[in-house]
């Protein structure tokens, strides 16, 4: 199997508090992967480290054998909805268009192709008629769709999505899942930070159970066991790990 | 004599000298003054019997001078304090008011009412040092006060004061001679702030300035434009910087007048609210005044 | 229109360009939620001015402004260092830098005054600025810096916009953070440095913060925010200067700040977004509707238990809000619509 995303010996700490410890992950192409774990398990940090937004203590992150700086055009990102100020004076269309900026590059202007890609993406997430709306007027679900559309115009091979289902209505959640499956069908790799155990089996074909360390990683049928879930969410897993770290 | 003895001896000599130095200054009594002009006056009258400390250094704007704790300490430690007091030391008023009246000489209080000049809005102009007659009378007042405090040296102070007044008379003659070089209609002095009214009054000069008697208020656009118009109307071709006011104040005036197609340039830099520094060679009142009149007359007769 | 004198023209030219570029650049800073940066950096220029004077002993504006520039950069570096290595909150560290640097500047100023030197006059003018004595070359300097900053903003428009809206996405898009944040700091510092000569280190931040705050009330589009802020800055600069010139002895910088304050107040009152006037009117409309349709709501919620007086009865019947059905009063579908609409006043 072709590995598009590989993490080796990755450790991240804020101050002296370990957030991720000794992470090894091999992610083949064309899968829909869920990263699941309790609060503070380091799920978002894992994504941010992969995208170079957080500096790791140690370890290595590679995409198709290359560092992030070489392949960023092939990677799409949906940050957490709450990470931006939705009162920013801009429109839906402009936010989605921002997904093209990395491709356009410095000193160049937005072109016709970029606008067309933006329109297509808006159409895809069902937000086309909202394109001229001020973003502060959007509902939580609509905000999420906008971010998704912005990732779509990045025209990537690998997508990282940080809690795309957080604070969205049922209809939007279903629409997003449909989109994720469509991406997978088109041979894209999609990595989603998720926190609802109940939907794991329906949404994903691969699963990473994370709690500072990787508890289990693999096809969802193999990984999603009672025992693994118990270990992930058990408090003393954390403690035993701290003991290990301190030694 | 070997080298070590030599070193030891010279150290001993140094120590003795140092001891003498401090001993001597303890014998003198310490007079603290605010501006350099007053400092010079006390030095001229007190000679080696007084130790003069001037709070404001040359080039310091007395209107703007903010006293420090060390200044308050020096005022409190001083045997005697001499100040202008006509609201020249605007920001020191609080500090100076707390000094007991027998320890302080406020020169402004000893100027005859009819000799004082006023601004349009009734504020007393504090730049009295440019009137040599006033200055001479104040020298006598100072000598009397020093004599009261230090009766042993009263005649010493009086003699020195009289000699200094003679010097001031000579300065007056020098200035009058130089002013004579100028035709009467050319006797117009334009500067950064209104410090030269007493000078103008004494020697028949018409004086104008960008800012009023205090530099504390901001120069306003209207002031500059009105004055520029005046330069045109009266055909004034030379204006003067002052050491204690930013040059840009006068530069802006020059530009404004040039924009009216008037030929005008800066004639030099005058000492207004302080004497020159030691490096300039104009560190006394007399030298400062001479330097000013030379600059003014040379520039205006060019 | 007006017969403007030379000095007024010069000063207005300077304040208009300064106001415009401060407002334009300020929009980027304020939308990044870093409004205080301008304030901190402008206060931080003071020690640089003083040190530049102490080192060179000359009163040349260029030298002093170079000192101001370096000092602001040092402050920015200190801010970033505090952010990186301590847990002090960013606003607290900004306040720390602001007061700390300003204090050091004051101490140096007082020291310089103490030790004298005939050329130190006017250093204290940097605290409150001195617009009236602006010279032509000062204005040229302002205009050139303003145009350079404007050009940079246009060239890096999309990157700056993305960076201030979503920093993480910006970085993940492979764009250089170091460059863009450096550029932004550099431009803010430039603007402050050209502005302190006019309005002083204390009021400079008003020029950076007030126009964008007012503009935000008036528009929801980014480019319009930038444009309106620039316009407000320019007009306030002009108005403030003109007002200060017509009354002798009114200082220009403070009058400009006052005009800006007035514009912000006006924008807050009259904003079509959520202006105070608009909200007040909405509440009044809501109240009067509740008063008029109270009985209708009662009738809807408790059918049969409400007695209408004849006036109300006629009004509701005539407007088709109620009808008589099986001998009882019922709210029609039009009446229900009316009730629902009461709650949505927009």
Image: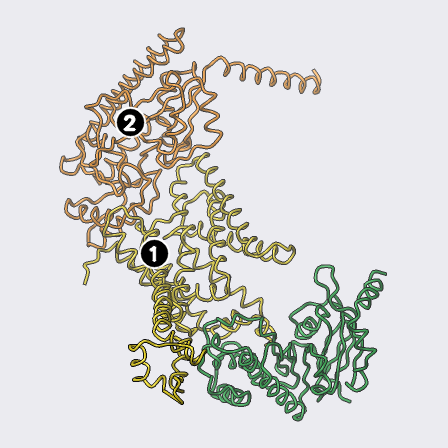
**Given the current orientation, which residue lies at the most extreme top position?**
B152
Q: Residue at x 40, y 70 (%)?
A: C225
The x, y position of residue C83, in whole percent, is 61, 57
> For this rendering, which residue is in front, C23 or C258?
C258
Q: Quadrant of the C terminus of chain A?
A: bottom right
Say which residue label 2 marks.
B129
Chain ID, green in image: A
Please say if A196 is above or below B193: below
Say which residue label 1 marks.
C137
Instruction: For chain C, give the colour.
Output: yellow
Q: Quadrant of residue A79?
A: bottom right
The x, y position of residue B65, in whole percent, is 39, 35
Q: Are marks 2 and 1 in contact (CB under 8 Å)?
A: no
**Rendering colour mode:** by chain
Q: Quadrant of the N terminus of chain A?
A: bottom right
Left or right of residue B154, residue A167 in this image: right
| Chain letter belonging to callout 2 | B
Q: Nearer the viewer, mark 2 or mark 1?
A: 2
Please say if C98 is above or below A238: above
Q: Residues within 10 Å of mark 1 (few under 14, many from 20)?
A: few
Instruction: For chain B, give the colour.
Output: orange
Q: Quadrant of residue B243?
A: top left
The x, y position of residue B228, in whole percent, is 21, 48
Please say if C189 is above or below A231: above
> For this rendering, which residue is in front, B21 or B27?
B27
Left or right of residue C252, residue A44 in this image: right
How far is mark 2 from mark 1, CA to CA? 36 Å
**Given the current orientation, which residue lies at the most extreme front position?**
C327
| Chain letter belonging to callout 1 | C
Q: Quadrant of residue A198?
A: bottom right
């Amino acid at each position: 199997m072709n590995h598009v995303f590989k993490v080796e010996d990755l450790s991240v700490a804020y101050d002296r508090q370990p957030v991720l410890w000794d992470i090894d992950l091999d992610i083949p192409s064309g899968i829909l992967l869920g990263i699941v774990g309790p609060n503070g398990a380091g799920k978002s940090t894992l994504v941010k480290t992969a995208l170079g937004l957080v500096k790791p203590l140690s370890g290595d992150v590679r995409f198709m054998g290359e560092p992030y700086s070489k392949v960023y055009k092939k990677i799409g990102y949906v940050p957490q909805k709450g990470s931006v100020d939705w009162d920013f004076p801009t429109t839906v269309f402009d936010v989605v268009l921002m997904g093209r900026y990395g491709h356009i590059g410095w000193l160049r202007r937005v072109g016709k192709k970029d606008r067309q890609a933006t329109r297509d993406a808006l159409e895809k997430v069902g937000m086309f008629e909202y394109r001229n709306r001020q973003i502060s007027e959007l509902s939580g679900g609509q905000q999420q769709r906008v971010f998704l559309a912005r990732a779509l115009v990045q025209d990537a091979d690998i997508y990282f999505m940080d809690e795309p289902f957080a604070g969205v209505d049922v209809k939007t959640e279903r629409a997003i899942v449909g989109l994720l499956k469509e991406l997978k069908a088109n041979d894209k790799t999609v990595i989603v930070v998720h926190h609802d155990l109940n939907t794991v089996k329906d949404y994903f074909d691969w699963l990473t159970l994370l709690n500072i360390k990787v508890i289990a990683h693999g096809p969802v049928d193999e990984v999603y066991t009672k025992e693994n879930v118990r270990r992930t969410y058990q408090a003393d897993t954390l403690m035993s790990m701290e003991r290990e770290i301190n030694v | 004599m070997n080298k070590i003895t030599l070193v030891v001896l010279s150290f001993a000599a140094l120590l003795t000298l140092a001891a003498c130095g401090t001993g001597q200054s303890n014998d003198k009594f310490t007079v603290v003054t605010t501006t350099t002009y007053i400092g010079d006056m006390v030095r001229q009258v007190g000679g080696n019997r007084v130790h003069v400390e001037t709070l404001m250094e040359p080039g310091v704007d007395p209107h703007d001078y903010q006293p420090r704790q060390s200044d308050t300490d020096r005022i409190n430690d001083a045997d005697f304090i001499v100040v202008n007091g006509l609201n020249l030391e605007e920001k020191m008023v609080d500090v100076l008011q707390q000094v007991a009246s027998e320890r302080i000489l406020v020169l402004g209080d000893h100027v005859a009412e009819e000799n004082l000049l006023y601004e349009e809005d009734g504020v007393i102009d504090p730049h009295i040092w440019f009137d040599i007659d006033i200055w001479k009378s104040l020298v006598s007042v100072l000598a009397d006060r020093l004599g009261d405090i230090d009766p042993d040296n009263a005649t010493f102070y009086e003699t020195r004061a009289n000699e200094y007044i003679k010097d001031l008379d000579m300065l007056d003659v020098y200035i009058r001679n130089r002013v004579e070089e100028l035709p009467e209609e050319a006797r117009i002095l334009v500067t950064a702030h209104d410090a030269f009214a007493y000078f103008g009054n004494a020697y028949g000069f018409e004086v104008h300035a960008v800012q009023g008697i205090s530099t504390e208020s901001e120069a306003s656009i209207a002031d500059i434009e009105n004055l520029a118009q005046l330069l045109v109307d009266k055909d004034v071709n030379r204006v003067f910087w002052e050491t204690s006011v930013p040059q840009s104040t006068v530069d802006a005036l020059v530009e404004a007048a040039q924009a009216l197609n008037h030929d005008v340039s800066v004639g030099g830099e005058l000492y207004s609210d302080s004497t020159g520094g030691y490096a300039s060679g104009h560190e006394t009142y007399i030298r400062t005044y001479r330097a000013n009149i030379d600059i003014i007359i040379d520039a205006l007769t060019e | 229109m007006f017969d403007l004198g030379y000095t007024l023209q010069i000063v207005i030219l300077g304040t208009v360009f300064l106001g415009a570029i401060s407002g334009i650049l300020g929009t980027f800073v304020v939308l990044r939620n870093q409004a205080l940066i301008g304030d901190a950096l402008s206060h931080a220029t003071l020690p640089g001015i003083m040190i530049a004077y102490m080192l060179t002993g000359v009163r040349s504006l260029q030298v002093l402004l170079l000192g101001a520039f370096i000092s602001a950069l040092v402050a920015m570096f200190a801010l970033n260092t505090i952010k990186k290595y301590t847990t002090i909150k960013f606003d607290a560290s900004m306040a720390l830098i602001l007061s700390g640097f300003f204090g050091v500047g004051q101490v140096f100023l007082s020291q310089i005054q103490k030790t004298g030197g005939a050329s130190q006059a006017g250093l204290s003018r940097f605290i409150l600025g001195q617009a009236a004595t602006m010279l032509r070359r000062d204005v040229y300097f302002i205009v050139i810096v303003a145009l350079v900053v404007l050009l940079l903003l246009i060239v890096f428009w999309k990157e700056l916009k993305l960076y201030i809206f979503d920093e993480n996405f910006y970085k993940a898009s492979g764009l250089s953070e170091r460059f863009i944040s450096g550029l932004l700091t550099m431009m803010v510092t430039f603007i402050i440095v050209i502005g302190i000569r006019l309005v002083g280190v204390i009021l400079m931040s008003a020029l950076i913060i007030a126009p964008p705050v007012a503009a935000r009330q008036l528009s929801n589009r980014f480019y319009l925010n930038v444009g309106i802020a620039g316009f407000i800055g320019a007009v306030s600069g002009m108005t403030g200067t003109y007002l200060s010139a017509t009354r002798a002895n009114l200082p220009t910088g403070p009058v400009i700040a006052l005009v800006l304050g007035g514009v912000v107040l006006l924008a807050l009152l009259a904003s079509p977004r959520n202006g105070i006037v608009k909200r007040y009117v909405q509440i009044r409309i809501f109240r009067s509707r509740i008063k008029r349709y109270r009985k209708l709501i009662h009738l809807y919620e408790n059918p049969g238990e409400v007695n209408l007086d004849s006036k109300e009865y006629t009004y509701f019947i005539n407007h088709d809000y109620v009808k008589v059905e099986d001998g009882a009063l019922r709210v029609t579908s039009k009446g229900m619509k009316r009730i629902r609409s009461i709650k949505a006043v927009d």
